[in-house]
């Protein structure tokens, strides 16, 4: 299915409660950060416009899904017709990284695309890491980029990246990576939604360019995966 003007792509953002999913989304869509951000109850819907090089506009519909265990059974209802998924973990909690595998299995089991659903792993709260960990090349030290890279590769994530919702570090890049993976998947497997649904589109073109709100720029670090 080719793109139509002003179509919508559905993206879901999941992960353990407290990892900063809502803050990452708010930084991306509004360039805002609230240190007192409340825990999401249920689901929230957000929007972001993407400008393609084919002069066609796509609106990302970003679903923020609560991370508490009681909402996991509800997640499958929101996976349907999704184009891609971001799983958020936390640089301060290794258990959130391990739980990302559970979330990945859950969303891919419920998706029409199965294990072909693009899933990007985002490790939030990079700003809380000590400089010694940020600069370390140890692949067995939790918090390093190499550790995350190895974990993501071992567990078949499409990509991974460390971000900070607080200062905006690599948040734009996170969503750009997801869009590229979605478009690549649609290039490889031309599969559209099984039913017409305003939440979903089949993305047909590989090249894309984010329409950005004013943002905080940082020296670009090599992305993992």
Image (spheres, rainbow, N blue to C red):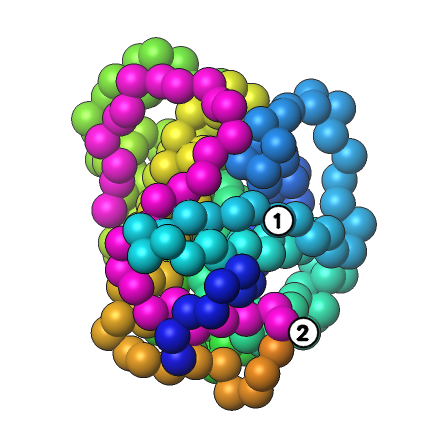
Tag on residue 77?
A: 2
**Horizontal relation, residue 151 to residue 165: left or right:** left
Instruction: Please state the horizontal and vertical placement of residue 73, each as a whole percent of the image.
Output: 70, 70
- Which is nearer the eye, 183 or 171? 183
- Asked where in the image residue 186 lies, by quadrant, the reply is bottom left
Q: Residue at x 59, y 56 (%)?
A: 61
- Which is nearer the eye, 111 or 149? 111
**Horizontal relation, residue 151 to residue 49: left or right:** left
Q: Are marks 2 and 1 in contact (CB under 8 Å)?
A: no
User: Dot 1, how many residues are within 10 Å of its Cα: few (below 14), some (14-19), or many (20+)?
Assistant: some
Q: In the displayed structure, would residue 64 be above or below residue 214?
A: below
Q: Nearer the viewer, mark 2 or mark 1?
A: 1
Q: Quadrant of the N terminus?
A: bottom left
Residue identified by numbered label 1: 47
Q: Residue furthest top?
A: 131
| Magenta span | 198-225
Instruction: Please state the horizontal and vertical placement of residue 116, each as a whole percent of the image.
Output: 35, 73
Secondary structure, mark 1, is strand
Q: Residue at x 30, y 64 (%)?
A: 205
Is residue 209 a member of the stretch shown in magenta?
A: yes
- Which is nearer the eye, 14 or 167? 167
Q: Residue at x 73, y 55 (%)?
A: 43
- Asked where in the image residue 55 lies, by quadrant, the reply is bottom left
Instruction: Please state the horizontal and vertical placement of residue 181, each as a whole percent of the image.
Output: 32, 58
- Number of on-image labels: 2
Instruction: Please state the horizontal and vertical placement of residue 185, each as a whole percent of the image.
Output: 30, 68
Tag on residue 196?
A: none
């Amino acid at each position: 299915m080719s793109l139509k003007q002003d179509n919508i792509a559905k993206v879901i953002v999941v992960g353990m409660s407290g990892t900063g999913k809502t803050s990452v989304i708010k930084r991306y869509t509004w360039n805002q950060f609230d240190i007192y951000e409340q825990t999401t109850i249920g689901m929230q819907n957000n929007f972001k416009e993407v400008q393609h090089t084919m002069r066609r506009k796509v609106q990302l519909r970003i679903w923020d899904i609560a991370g508490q265990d009681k909402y996991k059974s509800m997640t499958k209802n929101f996976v349907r017709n999704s184009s891609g998924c971001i799983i958020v973990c936390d640089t301060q909690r290794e258990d959130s990284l391990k739980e990302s595998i559970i979330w990945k299995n859950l969303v891919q089991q419920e998706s029409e695309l199965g294990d072909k659903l693009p899933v990007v792993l985002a490790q939030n709260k990079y700003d809380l890491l000590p400089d010694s960990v940020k600069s370390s090349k140890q692949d067995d030290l939790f918090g390093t980029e190499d550790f995350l890279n190895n974990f993501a590769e071992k567990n078949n994530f499409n990509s991974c990246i460390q971000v900070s919702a607080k200062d905006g570090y690599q948040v734009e890049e996170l969503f750009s990576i997801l869009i590229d993976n979605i478009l690549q998947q649609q290039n490889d497997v031309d599969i559209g939604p099984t039913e017409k649904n305003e939440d979903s589109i089949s993305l047909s073109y590989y090249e894309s360019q984010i329409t950005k709100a004013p943002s905080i720029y940082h020296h670009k670090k090599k992305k993992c995966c």
